[in-house]
Amino acid sequence: QCPGLKEPKKVEELQSKLICCLRDHLNSPARRHPQAELRTQRTQGLQRIFYLKLEDL
C-alpha cells in the first residue's frame, strides 16, 4: 500500500489490465518479426527514391 493513495483498488485494476495488455503484445504473432519486415520496406522505399531521382537527372 502506498500512503496517501485514495483508490488503491482502482490502481490495482488498472495495473492488472496493463499487465494483460503487455502480455498480449509480447505474445502476439505480429511481434515476432516486425523489425525485419520494416527494414525490407525501408530498403525498398529507398531504392524507389533513388531510381526516381535518377530518372529526373
Image: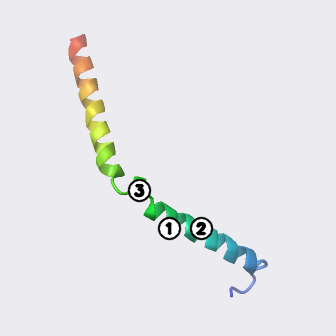
Quadrant including the C terminus: top left
Measured Cα–Cα span from mark 1 to mark 3: 12 Å
Q: Residue at x 25, y 11 (%)?
A: 56
Residue at 74% across, 74% down: 10
Regarding mark 3 in the picture, which secondary structure is present there? Answer: helix
Q: Quadrant of the N terminus?
A: bottom right
User: What is the number of the mark on residue 18?
Assistant: 2
> Looking at the rendering, which quadrant does residue 40 occupy?
top left
Q: Nearer the viewer, residue 30 or 52?
A: 30
Q: Amino acid at mark 1?
A: Arg
Task: Give the structural element (helix, strand or loop) at label 1.
Answer: helix
Gap between marks 2 and 3, in whole Å?
A: 19 Å
Amino acid type of disc 2?
Answer: Leu
Q: Residue drawn 41% across and 56% down? A: 29
Q: Nearer the viewer, mark 1 or mark 3?
A: 3
The residue at which mark 1 appears reads as 23
Mark 1 against mark 2, which lies toward the viewer? 1
What amino acid type should be assigned to the residue bearing mark 3?
Pro
- Residue 17: horizontal and vertical position, in percent? 63, 68
- Residue at 63% x, 73% y is 15
Q: Alpha-carbon neighbours of circle 3 within 10 Å: few (<14), some, or many (≥20)?
A: few
Mark 1 or mark 2: whose residue is earlier in sequence: 2
Q: Is residue 49 left or right of residue 3?
A: left
Image coordinates for residue 47, horizontal then vertical, percent: 23, 29
How packed is label 2: few (under 14 Cα within 10 Å), some, or many (20 or more)? Answer: few
Location of residue 42 (image quadrant): top left
